[in-house]
Amino acid sequence: MPTPLSETTILLVKASAPALAIHGTAITKAMYARLFQDAHIKELFNHSNQGEGGSQVHALAAAILAYAQNIDNLAPVVPVVERIAHKHIGYHILPEHYPFVATALLAAIEEVLGDAATPDLINAWGEAYWFLADLLKEREADIRKNLEAQVGGWNGWRPFVIAEKRPESSVITTFILKPADGGHVVRQKPGQYLTFRFTTPDGSQVKRNYSISCSPNDDHYRISVKREATGAGGSRFLHDIAQVGDAVEATPPAGDFFLPEEPVRPVILLSAGVGLTPMVSMVEAIGADYPDVQAHYVHAALNSSTHAMDRHVRSIAKDHGRISVATFYSEPAVTDAAGLTHDYDGFISVDWLKLNTPFTTGDFYLCGPKPFLKSLVTGLWMAGVEPERIHFEFFGPADELLAA
Ligand SMILES: Cc1cc2nc3c(=O)[nH]c(=O)nc-3n(C[C@H](O)[C@H](O)[C@H](O)COP(=O)(O)OP(=O)(O)OC[C@H]3O[C@@H](n4cnc5c(N)ncnc54)[C@H](O)[C@@H]3O)c2cc1C
Ligand code: HEM
């Protein structure tokens, strides 16, 4: 545990929270402008999430604001630290990178707040930054140590070879990845993601997270990727350019969204679109390792053309006997019919979940686009599901979802 913060720092940082609520995004933008003057630091980031309106800017602003608001009682910040630490492991952020952010952040606070940034306030923020940074560094060191100690464990970027590539639907393609060194892989917790570094044909580097879609094993990882027609390249690189035999690099599995080792409560998995990937990993793990666990997997897709891995999931459910599967199509194709190709037309609703799942006793795991998560996470909470029974993953920086 880092040295506790002084009373003066707590008072000064808390008093600056209203100013941060107004200027938080301006401060983090100014911070990134300074930080990215160093090319070595700039290349650590995922640039899809940066820039004008970039969600990483909001994610960091939200984290700093939440920190300032809670500095006298940091309990609510603990889960945020866990999520950030895992993100940092994915992007291979090391202790030596922290001073760069400190310098850039304090200079940015001075730049944006002007005369209001008194030397006492800057000192207080310096102390507060290093307190949070030390918490993150300690947790990240623990995670790294644990990953390295496991069979197949490693740290940093490791080359993988694409051993198999196969389409799962009109928009989702699966890739099987094996270590280029022929060794084992570390077993992920079902629900965790890998972070990749691809070199695109124009020579630029792209970093992206992809959830592992298979159950933990020693031999390989599987990822299943939706092609984004207009993206900067991660998914199009994988869909259009990468071929069997090609190499990609990945850091070890990370993420705080996963199925517990021995689930004690019924499990309710809810996904939409490509948000199915961590859920399929969980369904496979329940199928293989937890014969007694009762699970419900409810998935929403546009229609049968975009819906991936349905037969696979249903066959695991049938073999297991205690997993039920339900699918919703919001835009059924002319050849789709509820009761045949899928179970229901429309969207998953809290009312449907109340009637068809162990609503008052189960643990909910959700993954999907922002509107899906916002409506169901809020809906579950409003319907009385305790926050500790709601777990969710979002395929981007958690910005306002995290802040909420
Ligand atoms: C923890 C985690 C797990 C994930 N798991 C999966 C997974 O299992 N499968 C999967 O398919 N994806 C997953 N993702 C998402 C994945 O990391 C990529 O974000 C996704 O593949 C898109 O990357 P891209 O490079 O193709 O597109 P990007 O360049 O990142 O663009 C994404 C979208 O943003 C839009 N966009 C880009 N730049 C701008 C801009 N400047 N202004 C406005 N709009 C813009 C694009 O039009 C596009 O629709 C995951 C993400 C996270 C964080
Ligand atoms: C106290 C210090 C820091 C805080 C509070 C912080 C906060 C955050 C937050 C909130 C996120 C988003 C997490 C999410 O996706 O939900 C994040 C991601 C990230 N951070 Fe940090 N961070 C800190 C230090 C650093 C440092 C020192 C570096 C490297 C120089 C760094 C690099 C990154 C990268 C590369 C990501 C992933 C970016 C992405 O998804 O686009 N961070 N951090």
Image: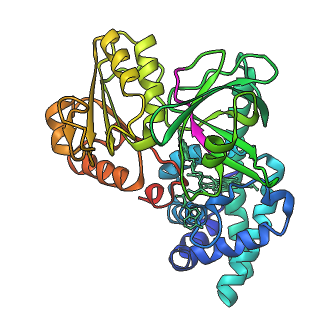
Residue under the image location 65 percent in, 84 percent down: 113
Q: Is residue 153 left or right of residue 58?
A: right
Q: Position of residue 188 (x, y in %)?
A: 59, 25
Magenta region: which residues?
A: 209-215
Residue 59 covered by magenta stretch: no
Find residue 159 and report its horizontal and vertical position in percent: 79, 31
Report the quarter where the C terminus lies: bottom left
Image point (34%, 11%), residue name: 320
Horizontal side of 315 relative to 229 (left or right) equals: left
Q: Residue 372's x, y, as percent?
A: 34, 51
Q: Is residue 25 depicted above or below 303 in this figure?
A: below
Answer yes or no: is residue 66 visible: yes
Task: Say which of 227 and 14 sits in front.
Answer: 227
Q: Is residue 286 left or right of residue 46?
A: left
Q: Residue at x 21, y 33 (%)?
A: 343
Residue 50, horizontal then vertical, whole percent? 65, 64
Residue toward you, 333 or 19: 333
Up/down of 104 relative to 378, above or below: below
Q: Can you see residue 2?
A: no
Q: Quadrant of the N terminus?
A: top right
- Quadrant field for ligand 2: bottom right
The furthest residue to the front: 335
**Residue located at (53% from left, 73% from top):** 17
Q: Count the labels in the image.
A: 0
Q: Quick one: which residue is furthest to the bottom in this view?
A: 115
Is 188 or 67 nearer to us in this picture? 188
Q: Quadrant of residue 353?
A: top left
**What is the quadrant of residue 121 in the picture?**
bottom right
Q: State the residue in front, 82 or 73.
A: 82
- In which quadrant of the rendered view does residue 130 lie? bottom right
